[in-house]
Amino acid sequence: MISFSKLAYDNLDDFLYGKAPHPVVLKNGLSIGGGTLYPEINFTLPTMLIEEHTMPEVIKIYKEIITGICERARELYVPGFVAEIETLPPMTFHPEWGEEVTRTVVEIIREHAEKYGIKAAVRITPNDIREGRDLVHMWHGSHWDNILETFTRCAEAGAELLAIESVGGKEIHDKAVMTCDIEKSIFALGILGCRDMAKLWSEIVQISEKTGTVAAGDTACGFANTAMVLADKKYIPRVFAAVVRALSSVRSLVAVECGAKGPHKDCGYEGVYVKAISGIPIAMEGRCAACAHLSPVGNVAISVADLWSNESVQHIRLLGGMAPTVSFEQLVFDCRLMNEASSQGLDKARMLRDLNADSDSYLDPQAYVLRPDVVLKIAEGIIMEDTHYHRTKKAAELAIAAIRKAHDDGEIKALEDKELNYLDLLEETVADMPSDESKFIEHMLEECEGEFDPGKYDMD
Amino acid sequence: MAILEDISQAVQKGRSKEVVALVQQAIDEGMEAKDIIDAGLLKGMGELGVRFKNNEVYVPEVLMAAKALGRGTELIKGKLVEEGVKPVGKVVIATVRGDLHDIGKSLVRMMMEGSGLEVVDLGVDVPEDVIVAAVNEHKPQILALSSLLTTTMEQQSVVIEALKAAGLRDQVKVMVGGAPLTQDYSDKIGADAYAPDAYSAAEVAKAFVSE
């Protein structure tokens, strides 16, 4: 495994959108992180069941979606884009269905590429089905086999970027989020999540090598975005969601440690930390993802993005066309503006980056921990530590300290007392956690007894 | 009675040990279990529920209170049976087949438990035949179904049709929820209620069982 002990950036001025120290260049020459911010469009089906008899309709809809997107790309002179297919659970349980969808989308993209010279690529993100009553083990059995088979089949069908929203540790993290239990969160992400990522991403990297594709990246969506959504609903404090965001970066970095090259997946806002540490390009989503969910980070999210995504949108009709086409157009215009600023010089690009960051970061601690300057400071502290556990614990400590200082200095809108009470609680809990990883695991296995099956992670 | 107010306050603060001690004291003083439940334990949860609705407290506080309420109720269970007091109501809850999302359903379950309802949680990715069998076995007043995907919400309709086929539809109120759902969709598939969030779901469920 690659070990990162130094940031990919020496100074903040170079930490920009559209540009990464280690760009990913695809077979058609599309360079992600090579100086241009490109749109990444994601879409999902309208209300319908996915079953064998509905698959012809499913394929028909995917054809409509991608054709509409390709035509809009031509109309708007889009130089390149990425289309992400996130398989729905039945398409991972039946890898041949995911393969058929991929082949359909790839063929239409290739037709348009030949006719109009648009450089486009497909990212395949198999739904991680390792949950539920039938799961026998995280790393073997039919669920595991189906995920890996879906990757292989879809890669062979033409998807060039391999990604996943993996769920190792999520069963514990769901409980951690609902109870704002930071110890449990660190156990789920820093121990279970990191161990699972190491197993899973070693396999994905091997598949990418065999199929001539790119192992791209993961996302802690099921962890940190779940916290963000609950914070938006005022179910949990925003400071907890902000801290989880920072510590989830250690877990998502494991993909790169295993050999993933980027672009990191869009809904993983922690990608900014992954980019700061590893230098790989990242996809991000923000204001153009309002079609999928509320977030307090709509502008700051674009500050250092290399692909700009909409998260997902249903295939429904709007006045401007079908929703995926409309959503794509919104991404295209955002990218145009950002790229125009870059073309007018680094000062303009830095100004636009900072305007995007400043416009969000005062209003919410979750946006504050995504500021490029804050990210570099926290990331630098994270990589000083040796193990995933120590790094995750450090990420929590540093995020808590950064939020408290920002509150005290008036850099973020004053936190309510009930938020500050939680910040105190988080700080005290993290300070009391042991530095000895084996003692921590022993303690957490007792704490989590009956809440998950350690045997599924070979911890029994 | 001061002690009932003390129980209510201890529940709201999530102090399980204190709740258990106070409930035991109330039993020792000869109070009726129904009064301890209604004017102490459930009153406390009700008041905390209002504070949650007003964004004064977060879910973890509600969960700690629900845990305290559960400890208090456990202590008094035998006495409730002796007095012939029936549970507030029973709910079977599940995320439907093909959908692996758990957290929204779990929040609804906890809010419902905090309202004094007994909840049987079938988990995620639950096929319609398993749900029908659970309704048959547990005889709940309410069946709550969750789905978070556009491609699984139709499964809620499949469950309702399966209940009809099993002759159970009239015996249970069906509530539906999940991010892509709407009241219109709920009406279209013949559900009895749609709840946009966990708190509303518990409120609707309480209203159903008190009918």
Image: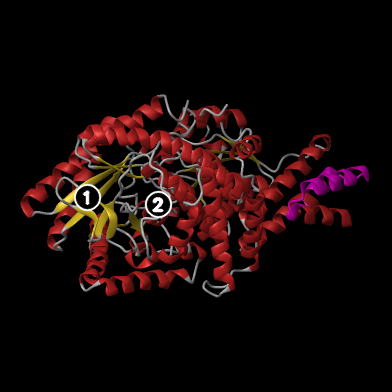
Depth check, mark 2 against mark 1: the one in front is 2
Query: Percent position (x, y) of residue B124?
Result: 49, 36
How packed is label 2: few (under 14 Cα within 10 Å), some, or many (20 or more)? many
| Image disc number at residue B17 | none
Query: Percent position (x, y) of residue B6?
Result: 84, 55
Observer able to see residue A235: no
Q: Please tell me whether mark 2 sits on a helix, a strand or a loop.
A: loop
Does the magenta run of residues contain B132?
A: no
| Image disc number at residue A65 | 1
Is the Cβ of the residue at disc 2 closer than 8 Å to that at disc 1? no
Which subunit holds the residue at mark 1? A
Task: Identify the magenta region.
Answer: B11-39
**Residue at x 71% of width, y 53% of height:** B45
Task: Return the disc, 2 or 1, that comes first in the chain's sequence.
Answer: 1
Quadrant in the rendering for residue B147? top left
Which subunit holds the residue at mark 2? A
What amino acid does circle 2 point to?
A: Gly
Query: Percent position (x, y) of residue A331?
Result: 27, 61
What amino acid does circle 1 point to?
A: Ile
Q: How many angstroms separate mark 2 from mark 1 (CA)?
A: 24 Å
Observer able to see residue B200: yes
Judge from the rendering whether residue B135 lies leftward or rightward of residue A30; answer left or right: right
| Image disc number at residue A268 | 2
